[in-house]
């Protein structure tokens, strides 16, 4: 039996430990493991290789994905999916573990509808924005990267009596910004999921400054673009003009996608992948996604994952409400 693994869409820490676990576990189960390089693009181009131990030796601690990733436009077209299927057939592969976001799962679901290739999706994105799972691989590492950067920016802000605005990634989802604001002790948290009133926040900040506050940490989600809510630049202007405090902005950007996977992400990678391989070994028709909820791994259909938009837990939003008042 032959199973392949691929990584698709935005890379994240935890993908390499997942690839290593996949290969080691397949060998243990006497299955031939294959690596599809460059995500869906590599599937079309036939960049597929039977894995050896050497391919995954020494990758556990590395961020990113050794088999690389891509966002493929060609895969939307049937003729390229057909080529991809023929590539898989030439290696005798009819099962895939795919690490990525819901867009990648949708692409493989179409592939399954076309050619019957079975797959299990492992939610892997720093955005933590996949409906049906509380946790996506890579989130813990990204949060720790943000924490480290925020602690460093706070050092310099406090030395200068300044405010800092730190922008996190997350696409349209404010999860990274929200959890970072709570865990880094920010004074302000601006995310698309929380209503806020800058006048109310402004009154609080002015009173705290009058009371001796020396610096302000403000964390904003990249999803807060100008047309939706207040962007990073607008917050800087507001802090300088309305609050009267010198302000600097730090856009963390792609640094959040890298770094050595944390212990938690390494463990989650091992567990997610083992569940995915076990599911495929049952030889059922599957287009499922492994999800993690309330400390348990479960399987849900791709239709379920696509049925709703991910929502941040209400109790987490509640914890951050004082940062928008
Ligand atoms: O989905 C992961 C993510 O890092 C988002 O947080 C971000 O908006 C986007 O990908 C950036 O994409 P790219 O790497 O293509 O610039």
Image (spheres, grey):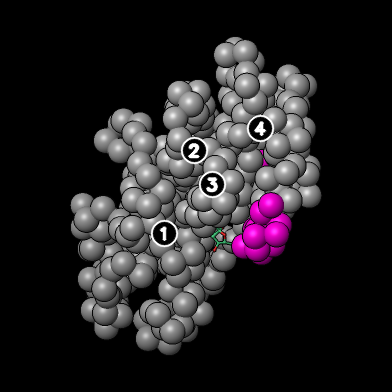
For marks 3 and 2, the one nearer the N-term is 3
In the rendered image, the residue lying farthest to the front is 115
**Residue 270, numbered label:** none
The answer to which quarter of the image holds residue 85 is: top right
Residue 295 spot, x, y in % from top left: 30, 31
Residue at point 57% right, 51% down? 114
Residue identified by numbered label 1:
177
Q: Are marks 4 and 1 in contact (CB under 8 Å)?
A: no
For the N terminus, the quadrant is top right
Whether residue 87 is visible: yes
Q: Position of residue 213 (x, y in %)?
A: 33, 65
User: Which residue is tagged 2?
Assistant: 120
User: Of marks 1 and 3, which one's residue comes earlier in the chain?
Assistant: 3
Q: Residue at x 78, y 44 (%)?
A: 46
Magenta segment, which residues? Answer: 64-82
Q: Which residue is the site of mark 4?
A: 93
């Amino acid at each position: 039996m032959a199973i392949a693994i691929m990584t698709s869409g935005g890379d994240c820490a935890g993908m390499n430990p997942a690839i290593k676990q996949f290969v080691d576990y397949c060998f243990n189960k006497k299955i031939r493991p294959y690596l599809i390089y460059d995500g869906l693009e590599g599937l079309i181009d036939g960049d597929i290789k039977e894995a050896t131990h050497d391919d995954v030796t020494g990758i556990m601690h590395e961020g990113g994905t050794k088999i690389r990733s891509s966002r493929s436009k060609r895969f939307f077209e049937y003729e390229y999916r057909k080529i991809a299927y023929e590539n898989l057939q030439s290696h005798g592969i009819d099962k895939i573990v795919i690490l990525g976001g819901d867009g990648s799962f949708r692409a493989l679901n179409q592939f399954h509808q076309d050619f019957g290739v079975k797959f299990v999706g492992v939610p892997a994105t720093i955005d933590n924005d996949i409906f049906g799972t509380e946790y996506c691989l890579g989130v813990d590492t990204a949060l720790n990267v943000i924490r480290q950067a925020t602690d460093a920016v706070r050092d310099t802000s406090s030395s200068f009596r300044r405010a800092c605005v730190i922008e996190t990634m997350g696409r349209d989802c404010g999860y990274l910004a929200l959890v970072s604001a709570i865990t880094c002790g920010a004074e302000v948290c601006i995310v698309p999921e929380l209503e806020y009133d800058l006048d109310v926040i402004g009154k609080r900040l002015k009173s705290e400054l009058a009371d001796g506050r020396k610096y302000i940490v403000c964390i904003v989600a990249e999803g807060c673009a100008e047309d939706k809510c207040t962007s990073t630049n607008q917050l800087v202007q507001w802090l300088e003009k309305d609050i009267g405090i010198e302000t600097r902005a730090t856009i963390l950007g792609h640094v959040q996608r890298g770094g050595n996977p944390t212990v938690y992400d390494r463990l989650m990678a091992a567990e997610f992948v083992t569940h995915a391989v076990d599911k495929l070994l049952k030889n059922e028709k599957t287009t499922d996604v492994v999800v993690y909820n309330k400390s348990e791994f479960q399987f849900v259909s791709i239709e379920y994952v696509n049925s709703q938009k991910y929502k941040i837990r209400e109790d987490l939003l509640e914890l951050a409400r004082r940062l928008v008042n």
